[in-house]
């Protein structure tokens, strides 16, 4: 109840700021419509928007799951196998430079026009922060713990599994927060690959038809979804890493105790 | 006097008159200093002109109807390409010989906003409806998706480009021209300006320069091509050469001239397809500069 | 191993041969030779910063450098050493019990929960088994690390100031526990408390100088544990403190 | 010399793998041309590509600098001011959900057709990983250090400046590694905004005109630039944080000493 | 402050009033009352985990809970306390000198480099000024933390086992240093070493039980420093160890 009320208040203030900007700047409504018009469209077209949101939400969730899995796996591989590091790391980095229009025909060729080509594109965008952050965490393990494990005759796998990975979980959490933040746009970009459903498609279509109100209504829903997703992931991560100090836990900048 | 002209898309032979006019000094002669800016998204230029961020935008007639319907303060002031370029394209050696063969097949499109309207008009002539086909948005890969068999046909292909592209890679296509299949003829490429500024004398000068360029192109096609390449050296390839030749006859010889009936008819067509709320008279969309 | 005086495998003696360790060009140990008798407790003392921990880490195989550490029985040392570092190195994501079970888990073995409980009870942490390290006091952390080391049940045990953070009574109790559980093993223990050395050692080695060398190397005559108020203890105390103060030239 | 040789070897192996795939799969060259064709085009059109690379490189560098600055500033603000956290954090997250086509006309309106509208788009993409990672680092400061600082009567600012920020630098480094990885695509996406130059523009153009060889030649250069940029940032970060344990420093998975 | 016996501002006595601290519902301190005389050194002892560090942190204002900590002079305590925690809390990114200067830097002041050098020299770290904490031995880290605390020059000084990680000789030297530099200040010090308490304390308090209460609270009669072999010292030792063992009911 409390966080809900506070969330609604935040939303209200932000929407008011938006209305204020539109009013004061006198910006043309076909560049940025005011919240009232957008909300009207949102209400009028909510069935359409929700339907497309369903598609996009599925892509987001699949992309996030796959991206996390692939990100973790590639970080582990790059970290533990010098050969993979040498040849794989450049590929991972280079993969981030691939624009969607270059990849789109290939993705469609490999995966068809179904949901998987979009999920693949979203995954490509999502996995990188996970890989990088987790890899960084794996690199930074306290050498004392590594030494301890070595005196205990830990095998390579045990060392990674029981020391390096848990020690890197806070860093991984950091990567997951970034991933959760970019997952929605990842799904939208995925829909550029070629799609006939999803908020990205809806926005693209509305934009081409100059239905700017509809585009912003869809965008509003997407942004709201993004914020909720991020907050959910943040909450989950806090619960999952209870040994981790966190100055937000007390909801104050500095801990009072 | 400085002017900014927003192209509809990347520089290509469709923009021939603009660059030839520039090369011939036709703008300079009339006291204009014109800068061309190519956007990445064809939807942006009309918005930016409507927001007075540029003087002139290159756009498409069907888009203009939609834009005016949504309240964008725009008017067509001139025509660049006076016929439709859009076509429904299939593989020449493919199974689709007539539009009727599309039943149960996949048609790719790249979101432009009115493909479905054209398509449904074309299908209607062959007794099909949109429910008889599967529409797939293929966005960036119009001809690749067709060539690699991902779709059986694409709508939104430009007859002067995509057909040549396919020919060059050895997979020639067959085009069904939209105006021959039940869509009213329209001007593919037009010049639009903010409706409050249509009296600006620079526009007249600009169109005069374009007219001069088109005349020159018709008279001296080889020299004109050389001038165009001089300004866009990276376009010197087989595809653009062919496209240039195919586009040449389609440029409006009288860029200022306005065919009111075209606008009336197309507005009615779009209204009938449910894409615009009201079919306004031509004056609401276009002006003829004098 | 509650009573466990006999480690698995006999406790080997250690030969420290010509060992050197340097940090950034500064030698901490240089051409050090030392033979540690099997099944004996050797206590290392020395001024803060002299190189005790460095030597222990070198024996544990955690530092590179010239020279070699060999077992007298000719077998490789790997897998026969338990090491308790100077800082507790508890893993913050594991409970106390999880930390104590760490060695077994790292070797893919399933530690006997009964034995973990027993071990925690002997160091007085029975109530803290489910706590995370962040919830422990300093002395409790040290005791958890001690329990983890004893849990390893190795013939060679290296301990770096294992009792420094607990009160006098607990310290005595833990020393007795060590005497009992570590009997028959080759133990090398660092301490700053001369009376602790006197009480527990079969052999006392004081390091001094840079690079560090043994400046005192004695075997008390009486059996251990030794009371601090005997004449022998008092003499030993004086000799140790004297040796601590030696500034030896390289 | 050594890293150069090893880098060239890596490049050779990866290009060979690419050639092999193209050969074995018999993929159509207008979907994915082989390296030989791409290299020919690269050589033939190098002047064009390098010219556009210049623009994109400038955008990358500016975007990275601005993104880092804005990312750090927003993390600090969000961390230290509960009010900003409440209203600002959702805005930051929502900003990531904005697709370029919705923003492009607005950016042109605000910043014109010049390089700054592109840099703004790139910055928008780059700042988020920096913010999130740095914020995470700021949240995780060892409470012991905070307490120590409090007994020393540290002011709020001093506490942040001298304790929280240095303690969060490794996390910030992690964010910067992600940022360096996405900066090139950020710049390419930025070139959708009122574009007329840059590798993104060149690629989109080439793609639209089926000059697939040229597109992949430009893409190859961009990817190479991306990898070099990442490696440079990684090296700099290692030098800048010498107190930070790093298992890559020894260039082995596990430290031998 | 090389000679600095006089802290800035007189050293206030402390009134610990009705203080409680609980972790997860378990009370560690409960309705504790204690008055510490100004300019005196009070040494706290107690079994590991009894709540000594908790009490010190409560006095330092780092823990919330019922009750209050007041200065006898009625002035607020903030800004008059220096606190040396049980773990060294050195900042890994600063050099040793930087760590010692931390308090000044945090207050926006420019510490006198000469004084930092002097302080490092007194704790025997003159050579280590430019090193990072990771390059120090355990005892060196503790001495760096001690130097940082002394650098603070506050009338009230709280120290949690400040000499636990150094050798016997260095410990004596540091104790003497403390006696000299902390004279005239209100000092509360936790230690596990009864003889250290006996040597340095104006007053000795032993805590026991859960929640913790003083079970011994004595002021040795002779002046400090006291030698460990006097009869008084022996008696005190016995009383302390006895008190440590008390299991007090709440
Ligand atoms: N953050 C915490 N959360 C839960 N319990 C805690 C926490 N910190 C301390 N405790 C508990 O409080 C009790 C007292 O801890 P404290 O650190 O004060 O002990 P201490 O007397 O200083 O012991 P030592 O001599 O071992 O340092 C211990 O039983 C410990 O488990
Ligand atoms: N990682 C390191 N880098 C550089 N110097 C180091 C490092 N570790 C230790 N040293 C130096 O080596 C010397 C010996 O350190 P060591 O930890 O062995 O001392 P110690 O005898 O255990 O001291 P203490 O009793 O204080 O624990 C010290 O002077 C220390 O500064
Ligand atoms: Mg040591
Ligand atoms: Mg304590």
Image: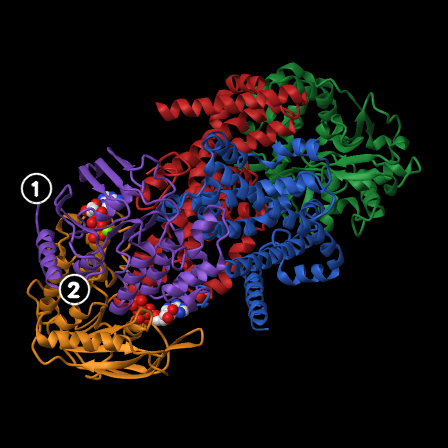
Chain colours: A blue, B green, C purple, D red, E orange
Q: In which quadrant will I find the C terminus of chain B? A: top right
Q: From the viewer's perspective, is E64 left or right of A194?
A: left
Q: Are marks 1 and 2 on the same chain?
A: yes
Q: Secondary structure at mark 2?
A: loop
Tell me what residue is drawn at x 83 percent, y 38 percent: B119
Mark 1 residue's CB less than 8 Å from ligand 2: no
Chain that bears disc 1: C
Position of residue E19 measured from the top left corner of the image (x, y, whole percent): 33, 81
Looking at the image, which is closer to me, A59 or C89?
C89
Q: What residue sits right under mark 2 in the picture?
A: C228
Q: Quadrant of residue E223?
A: bottom left
Disc number placed over residue C249 in the picture, else none? 1
Looking at the image, which is closer to me, D210 or E146?
E146
Looking at the image, which is closer to me, C39 or C48?
C39
In contact (CB < 8 Å): disc 1 and disc 2:
no
Position of residue B155 measured from the top left corner of the image (x, y, whole percent): 78, 34
Image vertical order of residue E54 relative to residue A212, above or below: below
Image vertical order of residue C195 relative to residue A183, above or below: below
Q: Is residue E14 visible?
A: no
Q: Is residue C180 visible?
A: yes
């Amino acid at each position: 109840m409390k966080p809900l009320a506070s969330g609604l208040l935040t939303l209200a203030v932000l929407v008011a700021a938006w209305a204020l900007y539109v009013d004061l700047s006198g910006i043309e409504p076909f560049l940025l419509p005011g919240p009232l018009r957008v909300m009207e469209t949102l209400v009028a077209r909510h069935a359409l928007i929700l339907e497309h949101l369903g598609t996009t939400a599925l892509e987001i969730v699949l992309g996030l799951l796959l991206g996390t899995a692939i990100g973790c796996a590639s970080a582990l591989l790059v970290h533990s196998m010098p050969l993979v590091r040498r040849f794989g790391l450049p590929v991972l980095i280079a993969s981030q430079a691939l624009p969607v229009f270059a990849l789109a025909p290939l993705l469609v060729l490999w995966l068809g026009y179904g949901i998987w080509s979009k999920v693949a594109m979203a995954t490509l965008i999502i996995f990188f922060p996970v890989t990088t952050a987790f890899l960084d965490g794996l690199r930074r393990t306290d050498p004392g713990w590594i030494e301890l494990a070595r005196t205990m005759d830990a095998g390579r796998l045990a060392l990674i599994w029981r020391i390096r990975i848990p020690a890197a979980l806070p860093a991984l959490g950091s990567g997951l927060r970034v991933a959760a933040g970019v997952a929605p746009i990842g799904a939208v970009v995925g829909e550029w690959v070629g799609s006939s459903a999803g908020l990205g498609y809806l926005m693209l279509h509305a934009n081409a038809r100059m239905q700017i109100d509809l585009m912003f209504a869809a965008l509003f829903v997407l942004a709201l979804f993004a914020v909720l997703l991020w907050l959910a992931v943040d909450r989950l991560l806090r619960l999952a890493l209870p040994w981790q100090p966190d100055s937000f836990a007390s909801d104050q900048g500095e801990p009072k105790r | 006097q400085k002017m900014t002209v927003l192209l509809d898309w990347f520089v290509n032979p469709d923009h021939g008159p603009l660059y030839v006019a520039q090369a011939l000094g036709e703008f300079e002669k009339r006291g204009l200093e014109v800068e061309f800016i190519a956007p990445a998204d064809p939807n942006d230029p009309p918005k930016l002109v409507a927001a007075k961020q540029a003087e002139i935008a290159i756009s498409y007639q069907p888009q203009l109807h939609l834009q005016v319907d949504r309240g964008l303060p725009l008017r067509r002031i001139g025509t660049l390409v006076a016929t439709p370029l859009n076509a429904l394209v299939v593989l020449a050696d493919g199974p689709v010989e007539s539009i009727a063969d599309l039943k149960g097949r996949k048609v790719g499109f790249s979101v432009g906003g009115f493909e479905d309207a054209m398509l449904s008009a074309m299908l209607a002539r062959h007794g099909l409806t949109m429910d008889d086909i599967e529409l797939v948005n293929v966005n960036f890969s119009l001809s690749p998706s067709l060539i690699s068999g991902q779709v059986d046909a694409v709508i939104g292909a430009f007859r002067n480009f995509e057909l040549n592209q396919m020919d060059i890679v050895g997979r020639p296509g067959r085009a069904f021209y939209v105006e021959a299949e039940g869509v009213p003829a329209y001007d593919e490429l037009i010049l639009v300006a903010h409706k409050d500024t249509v009296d600006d004398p620079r526009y007249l000068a600009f169109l005069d320069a374009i007219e001069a360029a088109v005349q020159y192109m018709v008279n001296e096609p080889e020299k004109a091509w050389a001038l165009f390449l001089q300004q866009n050296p990276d376009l010197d390839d087989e595809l653009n050469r062919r496209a240039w030749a195919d586009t040449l006859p389609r440029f409006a010889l009288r860029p200022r001239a306005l065919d009111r009936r075209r606008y009336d008819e197309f507005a009615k067509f779009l209204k009938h397809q449910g894409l615009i709320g009201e079919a306004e008279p031509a004056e609401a969309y276009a002006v003829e500069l004098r | 191993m509650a009573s466990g005086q006999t480690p698995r495998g006999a406790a080997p003696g250690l030969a420290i041969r010509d060992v050197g360790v340097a940090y950034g060009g500064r030698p901490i140990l240089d051409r050090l030779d030392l033979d540690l008798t099997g099944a004996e407790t050797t206590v290392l003392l020395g001024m803060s910063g002299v190189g005790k921990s460095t030597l222990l880490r070198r024996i544990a195989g955690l530092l590179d450098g010239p020279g070699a550490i060999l077992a007298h029985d000719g077998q490789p040392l790997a897998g026969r050493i338990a090491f308790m570092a100077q800082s507790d190195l508890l893993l913050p994501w594991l409970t106390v019990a999880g930390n104590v079970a760490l060695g077994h888990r790292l070797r893919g073995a399933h530690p006997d929960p009964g034995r973990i409980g027993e071990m925690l009870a002997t160091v007085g942490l029975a109530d803290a088994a489910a706590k995370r390290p962040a919830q422990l006091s300093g002395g409790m952390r040290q005791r958890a690390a001690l329990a983890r080391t004893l849990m390893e049940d190795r013939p060679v045990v290296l301990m770096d100031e294992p009792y420094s953070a607990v009160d006098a009574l607990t310290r005595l109790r833990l020393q007795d526990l060590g005497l009992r559980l570590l009997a028959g093993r080759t133990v090398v223990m660092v301490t700053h408390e001369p009376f602790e050395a006197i009480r527990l050692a079969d052999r006392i080695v004081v390091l001094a100088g840079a690079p560090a060398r043994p400046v005192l190397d004695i075997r008390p005559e009486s059996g251990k544990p030794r009371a601090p108020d005997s004449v022998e203890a008092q003499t030993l105390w004086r000799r140790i403190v004297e040796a601590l103060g030696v500034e030896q030239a390289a």
